[in-house]
């Protein structure tokens, strides 16, 4: 379609509505039904401000998640039952584990960068944001791992 064709199209639409195009035709309704649904739960050791900011940037900018669609939980003072309770209560579409969390998942072999199922939830074990902040050469590997989340959600 050329520019002149586009102009002719808009002129023909304008002729159909001499009083102006009705607002109801200009209003776009966004589907907000899933905008507050928790999609990703990040779970790992306590993070520094830089670690939290890295997760937030990856979730917002890279994964295109709203702040209401992901949460970050510290696993430091939790036991295995607490983790199961959090998963039942929060009901995320995806669980992202990072750092030293193996003691909380005793009967599970966590595979770095691999999609797994834990307690009926799709899960991903990834590099710790703290490690990535300390060694920027790990950013590419971290982001490659996080892209698996897009397959899940």
Image (tube, rainbow, N blue to C red):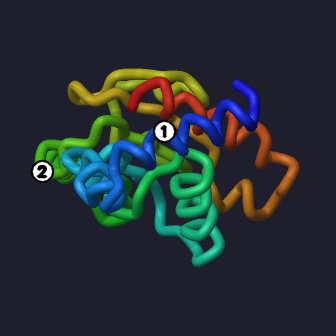
The answer to whether 49 is drawn above or below residue 16 in the figure is below
Q: Earlier in the sequence, mark 1 or mark 2?
A: 1
Residue 68 position by quadrant: bottom left
The residue lying at 35 percent from left, 60 percent from top is 20
Does any portion of residue 86 appear in the rendered image? Answer: yes
Residue 69 position by quadrant: bottom left
- The image position of residue 98, as x and y in percent, is 52, 47
Give the structural element (helix, strand or loop) at label 1.
Answer: helix
In the displayed structure image, the side of residue 7 where residue 47 appears, left or right: left
The residue lying at 35 percent from left, 55 percent from top is 18
- The image position of residue 80, as x and y in percent, is 24, 45
Residue beneath disc 2: 89
Give the structural element (helix, strand or loop) at label 2.
Answer: helix
Residue 126 vs residue 3, the one in the foreground: 3
- The image position of residue 13, as x and y in percent, is 44, 41
The answer to whether 9 is drawn above or below residue 27 in the figure is above
Residue beneath disc 1: 12
Residue 12 vs residue 71, the one in the foreground: 12
The residue lying at 51 percent from left, 49 percent from top is 64
- Which quarter of the rendered picture does the C terminus lie within? top left
- Which quarter of the rendered picture does the N terminus lie within? top right
The answer to whether 17 is drawn above or below residue 56 in the figure is above
Mark 2, other Cα within 10 Å: few <14 / some 14–19 / many ≥20: few
The residue lying at 26 percent from left, 45 percent from top is 31
Residue 87 vs residue 77, the one in the foreground: 87
């Amino acid at each position: 379609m050329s520019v002149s064709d586009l102009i002719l199209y808009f002129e023909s639409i304008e002729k159909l509505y001499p009083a102006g195009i009705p607002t109801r035709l200009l209003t776009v309704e966004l589907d907000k039904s899933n905008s507050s649904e928790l999609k990703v739960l990040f779970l790992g050791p306590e993070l520094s401000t830089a670690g939290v900011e890295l997760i937030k940037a990856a979730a917002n900018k890279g994964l295109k998640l709203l702040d209401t669609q992901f949460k970050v939980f510290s696993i430091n003072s939790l036991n295995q039952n607490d983790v199961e309770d959090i998963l039942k209560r929060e009901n995320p579409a995806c669980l992202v584990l990072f750092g030293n969390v193996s003691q909380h998942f005793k009967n599970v072999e966590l595979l770095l960068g691999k999609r797994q199922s834990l307690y009926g939830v799709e899960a991903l074990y990834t590099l710790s944001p703290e490690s990535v902040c300390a060694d920027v050469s790990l950013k590419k590997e971290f982001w490659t791992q996080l892209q698996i989340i897009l397959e899940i959600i």
